[in-house]
Amino acid sequence: FSSQNAHGLSVHVEHRPASTVWVHLKGQLNSATAAQFVAELRTTLARRDDRVVLNMANLANLEHDTAHTLAAGLRSYRDLIRIVLPLVGEFAALATIIPIYR
């Protein structure tokens, strides 16, 4: 499954063995888009037992408020979600996920 919204965020969902789903985010992610993404992912996680790998390695940027929206919204599913962070770039906001997400 793949989709792209008007704000420049592309979401690609890839089912893998062992009840694992990779969700690849690419492009722009802002607070409003993050809130919508979190709501949809929470709805899906409530219905399924899959583990999720949230691949954020291809995001163009991520602001502090957006990282907080993701972390706060997905906190209750932290045992099912693993996050792939970008290797380089201006992603200081991602550091906020670590203390909030615990």
Image: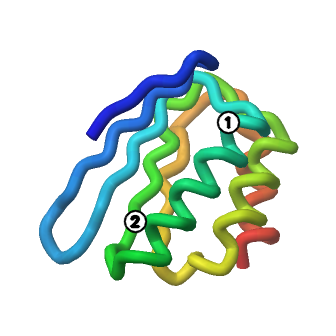
Percent x, y for residue 76? 66, 80
Q: Is residue 82 above or below residue 28?
A: below
Q: Earlier in the sequence, mark 2 or mark 1?
A: 1
Seen in the picture, residue 31 relative to 55 is either above or below; the reply is above
The residue depicted at 58 percent of the width and 16 percent of the height is 6
55 or 89, which lies in front? 55
Q: Position of residue 11 (x, y in %)?
A: 42, 36
Q: Is residue 76 above or below residue 60?
A: below
SS for tag 2? strand
Q: Amino acid at mark 1?
A: Thr
x then y, percent, for residue 42: 56, 66
Q: Report if the CB atoms under discs 2 and 1 are less than 8 Å apart.
A: no
Q: Nearer the viewer, mark 2 or mark 1?
A: 1
Q: Report the coloring of the rendering.
A: rainbow
Specify few, some or many for label 1: CA neighbours under 10 Å numbering under 14, 14-19, or 20 or more. some
The image quadrant where one finds the N terminus is top left
Corner quadrant of residue 60: top right
Other-residue count near label 2 (Cα within 10 Å), few / some / many at <14 / 14–19 / ≥20: many
Q: Residue furthest left?
A: 17
Amino acid type for the residue under numbered disc 2:
Val
Q: Quadrant of residue 28?
A: top right
Residue annotated with mark 2 = 52
How many numbered dots are placed on residues in this image? 2
- The residue lying at 45 percent from left, 27 percent from top is 10
Q: Which residue corresponds to mark 1?
A: 33
Nearer-the-camera pick, 99 or 79: 79
Nearer to us in this view, 100 or 89:
100
